[in-house]
Amino acid sequence: MKIKQGYKVRDIAGENVVIMQGKVGADMTRIITFNESALLLWNELLGKEFEVEDAVRVLTENYDVDAAVAERDARAWVERLADCKLVE
């Protein structure tokens, strides 16, 4: 899978918010925000083909986290991106 082009993360009022570049009149009823680890995954995997295992690797390389916990969190992140139609 790959993060769809045209989406960027911007800091808005201290929150990391996903926005669609150039979209006028965007639907603000469904705002996607990232915490620190979700933002790390986004930045590391943006523009690349990736699988859940790649997200697990990013988490375990950057945080002192058990592989099972990293896998659970990576799967949840990928599922959320898919639910919000941010990956193809």
Image (cartoon, rainbow, N blue to C red):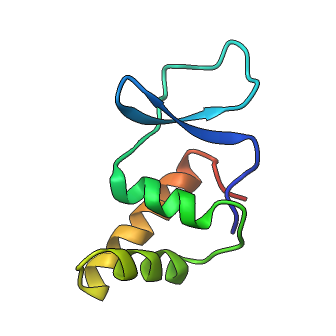
Q: Which residue is drawn at 72% across and 51% down?
A: 4
Q: Percent x, y for residue 12? A: 44, 25
Question: In this view of the protein, can residue 71 be seen by the observer?
Answer: no
Question: In this view of the protein, can residue 61 be seen by the observer?
Answer: yes
Answer with the quarter of the image where residue 33 lies. top left
| Numbered-mark total | 0
61 sits left or right of 4 in the view:
left
Residue situated furthest bottom in the rendering? 67
Q: In this view, does 86 lie above or below 29?
A: below
Q: Is residue 14 above or below residue 60?
A: above
The C terminus, quarter of image: bottom right
34 sits left or right of 30 in the view:
left
Front residue (pair 29, 24): 24
83 sits left or right of 61 in the view:
right
Q: Percent x, y for residue 1? A: 69, 69
Q: Percent x, y for residue 23? A: 73, 22
Front residue (pair 44, 55): 44
Q: Percent x, y for residue 37? A: 36, 59
Residue situated furthest top in the rendering? 25
Q: Residue at x 38, y 75 (%)?
A: 59
Q: Which residue is drawn at 65% across and 60% down?
A: 46
Q: Residue at x 47, y 53 (%)?
A: 80
Answer with the quarter of the image where residue 15 lies. top left
